[in-house]
Image: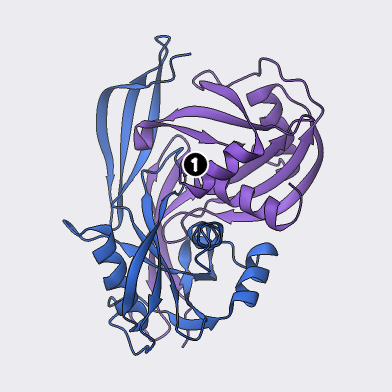
Chain colours: A purple, B blue
Amino acid sequence: MDLTETTLSTTRLFDGIVFDVDRHEVRLGDGTESKRDIVRHAGGVGVLAQQPNGQFLLVRQYRKAIEREVVEIVAGIREPEEGPEDTARRELAEETGAQAGEMVSLGTYVASPGYTDEIDHLFFTKTTGNTADGKLDSDERLTVEFWDAEAMGNAVRHNGIQDGKTVVAWCLAREKGLI
Amino acid sequence: MDLTETTLSTTRLFDGIVFDVDRHEVRLGDGTESKRDIVRHAGGVGVLAQQPNGQFLLVRQYRKAIEREVVEIVAGIREPEEGPEDTARRELAEETGAQAGEMVSLGTYVASPGYTDEIDHLFFTKTTGNTADGKLDSDERLTVEFWDAEAMGNAVRHNGIQDGKTVVAWCLAREKGLI
């Protein structure tokens, strides 16, 4: 079966703060025409960071979209012309004050390909140890938490950590024997 | 630190096909005011389905948002008033023709809480075996694939499968000793 969808025309329907929305008129392989609304997002990174004492650095934030606090790995949107590894180092420093060691790629995370183009590069790093007050965006509020491996494994297993990129980074770091 | 963000007003800025967009004017804990653009999505399900012979049922679709074919677990958006388990059974039948056995909850998947409210309920099920032509939406095209556990484990580990809900469902089913 020919799965490809060819774009016939594109219209920008929404210009937002962190994402835009385009509508594509598409033609399917058998000639059927349809429409796809797509969130345009810059993409970003997620960083699973481990302290020299073995604890993991997580951040707790209020996420308005789901009206609750969410515990996540360090993450952020890439700046124009910034490579993923540089984004990862910058976000780790901004959110936790910690300095990254070697950045090990865990792969990429596709958040929800049915309607958003967000793709995040995931990394594992061992920090040099110290954390400090970071340098957050003017409307960014978060607290840094230190979790040991057992607490994190339990939280993943029992769905206490639900954020997709965080679970994926944890599982991939385990699958690759990094933690 | 008070992380809560209180909504001062909400405006619907985009009405779409599978999602809408709201802008919230918010007040942070320290009185700072800001704006949050939020994708409103119905949420859905993902189903890791295993055949009696041990193979996993995956679906391959062209995802316009990232302009490529993506291999994913069976997934779909819930209908109004439909419970997650019913959505999961319906989607499995529609996409693969297979009938689900017991539905085991794996937990919930938060796709990207910085800007979308999408939360998916993930399940594991053993099918009764037969697949058939499903009953797809008029503009839905996919092919069903049969993957053995070794191929799937390798694809997750080496980032050949990148879809977030698929990786999370796989890891959680393994963590829980289901597969």
Please give the residue where the numbered disc 1 appears in the rendered image.
Answer: A161
For numbered disc 1, what is the local secondary structure? loop
Letter of the chain that mark 1 sits on in the rendering: A
How crowded pointer 1 is (Cα within 10 Å; few <14, some 14-19, many 20+) is rated as many
Which of A146 and A16 lies nearest the eye of the viewer? A146
In the figure, B86 relative to B58: above or below? above
Q: Residue furthest top?
A: B30
Residue at 26% across / 60% down in the picture?
B78
Residue at 49% across / 44% down in the picture?
A163
Q: Is residue A58 left or right of residue B46?
A: right
Counting from the top left corner in percent of width and height, residue A88 is at 70, 38
In the figure, A119 relative to A3: above or below? above
In the figure, A48 relative to A133: above or below? below
Q: Is residue B59 left or right of residue A42?
A: left
Residue at 52% across / 81% down in the picture?
B55
Counting from the top left corner in percent of width and height, residue A10 is at 42, 60
Counting from the top left corner in percent of width and height, residue B166 is at 50, 63
Please indicate, yes or no, whether residue A42 appears anywhere in the rendered image. Answer: no
